[in-house]
Image: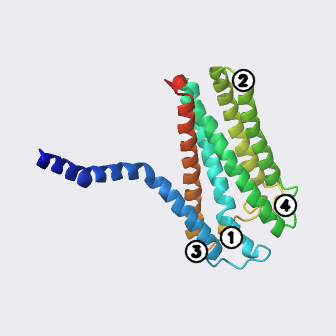
């Protein structure tokens, strides 16, 4: 009997711990990757050489923070849109919760992107806010999504709140794309942002291959961090509404 117990303990320590480690890594690898990529973007963003551009100067380093945060915001808003459509087709309240929490996290990324953009504008344009079509469009888009949160808070019935919110979310997403990605790119529109109002995009004149080595991983990193926060909020939401989902 002691020999069997000895072998059982040996087996657990040798194979059980390995299996537990594998299962742990299956759920953690993308989170660890997100942390590593964001740290890489922060270190590279402050230390790597960047092109010497007039007006922009060293502020071009904000490319590694401001723009990836906006990408993460739009990806999370797309996740929210898909979840809202899934709710309308299935009536599953978990999809509604996913849509709501994705908006909350995307607004966090949006406000971070707005803050870094205002710092950037203050150094390059002389003021944190100008009458720029993309800046104004961004403000309107964020307010539309803030109204989404207010709308949800004003409705008490779960299914009615989910249905109205899902329809509004589809409208909000279309408006967001219009104000941020379409209207600023119209040929007759005047904008200070690269790639808008007839201005060339970053990649065509001042983003070299060294910058791309940090820029693209930064987009992936911030998106993974945003998805991790969304995952945590969904787990909390599921615990708080266990009876509702069951």
- For label 1, the residue is 61
> In the figure, is residue 148 to the left or right of 210?
right
- Mark 2: which secondary structure? loop
Q: Position of residue 175 (x, y in %)?
A: 73, 40
Q: Identify the residue shown where x is 80% and y is 48%.
A: 139
Mark earlier in primary sequence (2, 3): 2
Distance of label 4 from label 3 (alpha carbons): 28 Å
The quadrant of the picture occupied by the N terminus is top left
* Disc 1 versus disc 3: nearer the observer: 1
Which color scheme does this rendered protein use?
A: rainbow
The structure residue drawn at horizontal position 63% and vertical position 58%, both measured from the top left corner, is 68
The disc, 4 or 3, on the residue closer to the chain's N-terminal end is: 4
- In the rendered structure, are the residues bearing label 2 and label 3 in contact, judged by CB atoms less than 8 Å apart? no
Residue matched to label 4: 128
* Residue 23 vs residue 218, the one in the foreground: 23
Residue 210: mark in rendering: 3
């Amino acid at each position: 009997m002691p020999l069997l117990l000895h072998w059982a303990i040996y087996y657990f320590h040798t194979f059980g711990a390995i299996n537990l480690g594998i299962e742990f890594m299956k759920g953690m690898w993308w989170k660890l990757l997100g942390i590593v990529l964001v740290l890489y973007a922060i270190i590279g963003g402050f230390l790597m050489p960047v092109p010497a551009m007039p007006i922009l100067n060293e502020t071009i380093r904000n490319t590694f923070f401001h723009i990836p945060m906006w990408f993460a915001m739009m990806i999370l808003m797309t996740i929210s849109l898909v979840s809202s459509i899934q709710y309308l087709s299935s009536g599953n309240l978990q999809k509604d919760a996913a849509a709501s929490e994705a908006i909350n996290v995307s607004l966090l990324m949006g406000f971070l992107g707005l803050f870094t953009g205002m710092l950037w504008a203050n150094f390059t344009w002389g003021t944190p806010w100008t009458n720029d079509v993309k800046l104004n469009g961004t403000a309107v888009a964020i307010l539309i999504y803030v109204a989404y949160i207010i709308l949800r808070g004003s409705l008490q019935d779960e299914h009615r709140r989910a249905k109205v919110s899902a329809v509004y979310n589809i409208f909000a997403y279309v408006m967001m794309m219009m104000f941020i990605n379409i209207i600023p790119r119209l040929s007759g529109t005047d904008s200070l942002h690269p790639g808008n109002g007839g201005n060339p995009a970053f990649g065509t004149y001042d983003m070299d291959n060294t910058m791309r080595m940090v820029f693209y991983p930064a987009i992936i990193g911030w998106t993974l961090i945003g998805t991790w926060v969304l995952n945590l909020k969904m787990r909390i939401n599921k615990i708080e509404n266990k009876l509702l989902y069951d």
